[in-house]
Structures are given as C-alpha cells and as structure tokens.
Image: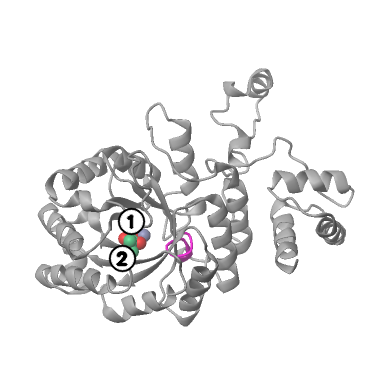
Amino acid sequence: MTDSTTPAGDAQRVIIFDTTMRDGEQSPGCSMNLDEKVRIAKALEELGVDVMEAGFPIASNGDFEAVRAVAQVVEKAGVCGLARAAKPDIERAAEALRPARRPRIHTFISTSPLHMKYKLQMDPETVHQAVIDSVGWARNFTDDVEWSPEDGTRTEHDFLCRCVESAIRAGATTINIPDTVGYTVPDEFRALIEMLMNRVPNIDQAVISVHCHNDLGLGVANSLAAVGAGARQVECTINGIGERAGNAAMEEIVMALRTRQDRMPYVTGVDTTQITRTSRLLSAITGFSVQPNKAIVGANAFAHESGIHQDGVLKNAQTYEIMTPESVGLGRSNLVMGKHSGRHAFREKLKDLGYTLGDNAFSDAFRRFKDLADRKKEVFDEDIIALVDDEVMRG
Ligand code: KIV
Ligand code: ZN
C-alpha cells in the first residue's frame, strides 16, 4: 500500500517513527514544554525521521498546544497525535493536528486478556467493536490512521488477527504491534510478525510497524527481528528514553541497519551525521543524561582506554571501531573548552557539533561563550549547544 508516509515502491525502506515527544516524554523527569518540543521537532526533521509522534493531545492543554505548535513548524515529516479508542480523544488529536501538512492519528486499545479484564474491564467483543469504531472515526479526519493493540505481544493470536483485519478494513493504513511491557524475545517476536503476515488476509493493505519497550534490554533486538519478518516501520526514541526502562533507541536501530547491511539490507531516511547533535540536544533540554557506555551516543562509545586498543586504532581505526565517529556526527578531536579557548577552537567545536554560523552570529556566540567560561571551569558540549541554539532562535 502507499500513503503519504510510505516511501512507495521500495520494499527495503524502513519508516522511522519517532516517539521521543510522546512515549519518550512519559519517562519520569523527561517532560517538555511547548518551546522544547518545537526545538526537538526541528532537530528530528533535520535528522530525517519519517513521522514524529508529538504528544497525546487530550492528556492536557499543554500537550494539545505543543502538538499544534509542532504541526505548524514541521514541513516534511508526518506529525502524529495519540488517541485512545474514544471519539473525544480522536477529535482532540485531529484538532491539534489541523495545521500539519501530513497529519496522522494513532489510536490504540488494549487487546490482551489481562488488560481487557483488569484495565479496561471490557469483554473482547466490545473491544473489537471499539477498534472498528475508533479507526473509522479517525478516518473522518485524515487518511493516515495508525492502529495499535496495546500489550499486543501478550494478546491471544486469533483475537489479534481478527482485530488487525478489522482495523485495516475500517481504514487503518499502519498496524503497529507494541511490546508494551518489553516481554517478548527476538525469535518469538519475529514469529509473531510472520504469523500476522501469513494469517491476516488484508495485511498487505497496511504497513506493519513495531513498538518495543526495553524492560529486558531487548527493545532494539526485537525491533530488528521484526524488520527481518517484514515490519516496515519501527517506533523508537532518541537515547531510548521512555516508560520504565525506555523504548528501542533510534540511534541503535539506524546504525545497526547501516553497519550490518550484509545481514540486514534495509535502508532508512535518517541522516546519521545528525545523531550525536540530536541526542545531545535532547539531554540538554530534559536534563536526562546518557550513560557513558550507551551504544552510539554515550561519551565512551568511541573512546579507547587501553594501550593495546589505542595502538590498534592508531594503526587502523577498524581494528576496534565498527563504525566511524564521523558517521554519527562526532568530530575526531575531543576539544576541552574553557576560558583559555580561542576563536579557532570555538569554531572547530561548533563545526563538530554541526553548526555553521555567519560572522556576526559567531562573534556574538563567542562573546557569550567567554562570559560563560568565566563562570564555569569547563564548558560542556551541551552548554554550547544551548548557547548556540538560543543564538539561532534570537537571530
Ligand atoms: O507501549 C505501548 O503499547 C504504547 C502504545 C500507545 C502504542 O505506547
Ligand atoms: Zn510505548
């Protein structure tokens, strides 16, 4: 099938659906205000994500306004709002998305026995009808509708197939299978996606998506297993932020696909050189730091400590590096910035961080950097990013 967010005719293309501003924001301590979401949205657009889920508009007026502001500024990517299987939720999402060039409504309802009995207190027939009604209602506002069976990996297979088939018949163009509690393991999840591909008769009319949580540290592995089985959208967050142990980390999925083309010949639209910059911007905005040994974006991800490794890397970087720091937007040099740093070092640092400023903006940023360096022993990349982003917004 093709729709506004499906790269047509390319079977190997994986759609990157970013949910940093929705599921990511559900991490304790990661909430973002309107301006912060707009900054993240602009960075995600430069990164090249296909769709960004900007929030849950019915959750609060703040979230509604933030989704609307993101919908106003994003030019290329699809902008998505989350809604439960209820008309007021769907209408609120549609209203917030009204300015979007490519609006998507994402509606969901739990389908596992546990969730239906205890959380929803609904019987399966009522849930099934709600799937049809919610997707059909969402289609009144956009032709780009995503449907998710929450707790999909703990849902009984016959019921899952029936709900997926009905959601597609009601007009869903993307079917997203969430591993809500991070319970599945890669071979099991691969088999689940294969089962859906084989058993749901109209499955080829929708894009299959996956949404993996990281409770067992398997979010990325499960997502990649699903891509191998035919999923063509992956939902993920920058730095893997999200509920509890987080969501599958976008930078890990994208770099795994890029680095292991021999095993996984799939492509994304992400400009990987923007990864480091986006990761740091998110940390600076949320104050949620990345663990030093985090894959791809941790401070030590491209650092070499032991003499043997350093010797190897100096002779040929590939001895201990499976991808280059440049490919994720990291400069080779690690300049420590402080009050003695000059204009040249500052310009190099800006280049490493992905900024090119005009002469006036550069002089202004440099003056403000020096003021900051007088107050702080060491000026970190996050400080410079915040300082320059302010400069760009003021300029
Ligand atoms: O984890 C989950 O099930 C979700 C859904 C709303 C897709 O975030
Ligand atoms: Zn989730």
Mark 1 sits on what residue?
3
Q: Are marks 1 and 2 in contact (CB under 8 Å)?
A: yes
In the image, residue 102 sits, relative to residue 85, either above or below, namely above
Residue 374 appears in which quarter of the rendering?
A: bottom right
Residue at 74% x, 55% y: name it: 384
Numbered circle sitting on residue 341: none
Q: Magenta residues: mostly which secondary structure?
A: loop
Q: Amino acid at mark 1?
A: Asp
Q: Is residue 252 left or right of residue 83?
A: right
Q: Amino acid at mark 2?
A: Asp
Mark 2 sits on what residue?
143
Residue 258 position, x and y percent, is 47, 35
How many numbered discs, if any?
2
| Residue count near mark 1 (Cα–Cα under 10 Å), binned few <14, some 14–19, many ≥20 | few
Residue 210 position, x and y percent, is 32, 51
Query: Which SS class for mark 2?
Result: loop
